[in-house]
Amino acid sequence: MIDLHLHTDYSDGIYPPKELLSLAVKAGCDFISITDHDNIRAINEIFALLETGHNDIKYITGMEMDAVFNGLKLHILCYNFDHNSECIKNLFKHVALLKREYKARLNENIISSCADEMEKAKYKPSAEFIIENIHNAGGFVSLAHPIKLQNKFNMSLSALDLFTGELKDKGLDCIEAYHSLHDADDVKNYLEIAEKYRLKVTAGSDYHGINRNYKYKTDVNIGKVTSYDLTLDSGKFIKELL
């Protein structure tokens, strides 16, 4: 079983890394990534835990980052990077600078806490900057849960297609074709986009913990990477992705 989109209590999940890892093993996962929002604090803990057990599970570094592209806020999943790289340190320094600028402008009443998404997006790192630094740190990136992007911006499938193609031109590697919100038609559509732009695909539940999964639905379990019953061949998936 594969699940490359999990959250701990270092972001908005409810379980600490050790407990989440145990739950993933209990669920039958053999390929995982923890993708906390805009931080990598779980990584060293997971590596330490894996050294003392759970040798049968494949783990790659990960995080989910807020980004902006073409004026729209989106999430970029970052994978398999060297978390000790100077590029990762520079990425977080840039994010911290943007946050300080945002808070300063709030305090100075230059912008409102009720500012629209377009205004808030100005204080998020660009997708291009994230992609460049993750690549330089030896990793790859995936467009997270495209169905949420479509729903949030009332984006048609053809518009998402164009948006994804433009991201591909900036270095996008993958699209999260398999996600717990995606039905069979969604998966089919996103696999076609992946094939069109020669993108690899990722799969994740977006698990945050019992009763903490995002407002769209709550019946998300670890390893549930579509809204319908589907089992992916994790061995084949690993071979194609890495």
Image: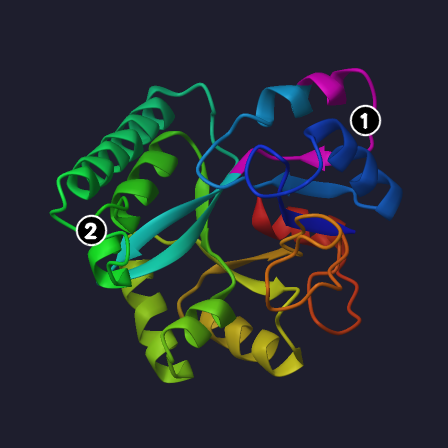
Residue 127, disc: none
Q: Position of residue 20 (x, y in %)?
A: 74, 37
* SS state under label 1: loop
Residue 122, disc: 2
Q: Which residue is mark 1?
A: 55
* Residue 30 seen: yes
* SS state under label 2: loop
Question: For the point 69% across and 68% down, which residue is it?
Answer: 226
Look at the image and tell me in which quarter the C terminus lies.
Answer: top right
Q: Amino acid at mark 1?
A: Asn
- Which residues lie in the magenta part? 48-62
Q: Residue 180, located in which quarter of the rendered image?
A: bottom right
Q: How many marks?
A: 2
Question: For the point 76% across and 64% down, which residue is it?
Answer: 219
Display colour scheme: rainbow
Assess whether residue 78 is covered by the magenta stretch.
Answer: no
Question: Mark 1 or mark 2, which is nearer the start of the sequence?
Answer: 1
Going by the image, does 188 lie left or right of 114?
Answer: right
**Looking at the image, residue 130 lies above or below residue 198:** above
Q: Amino acid at mark 2?
A: Lys
Q: Position of residue 133 (x, y in %)?
A: 32, 35
* Residue 57 seen: no
Mark 1, other Cα within 10 Å: few <14 / some 14–19 / many ≥20: few
Closer to the eye: label 2 or 1: 2
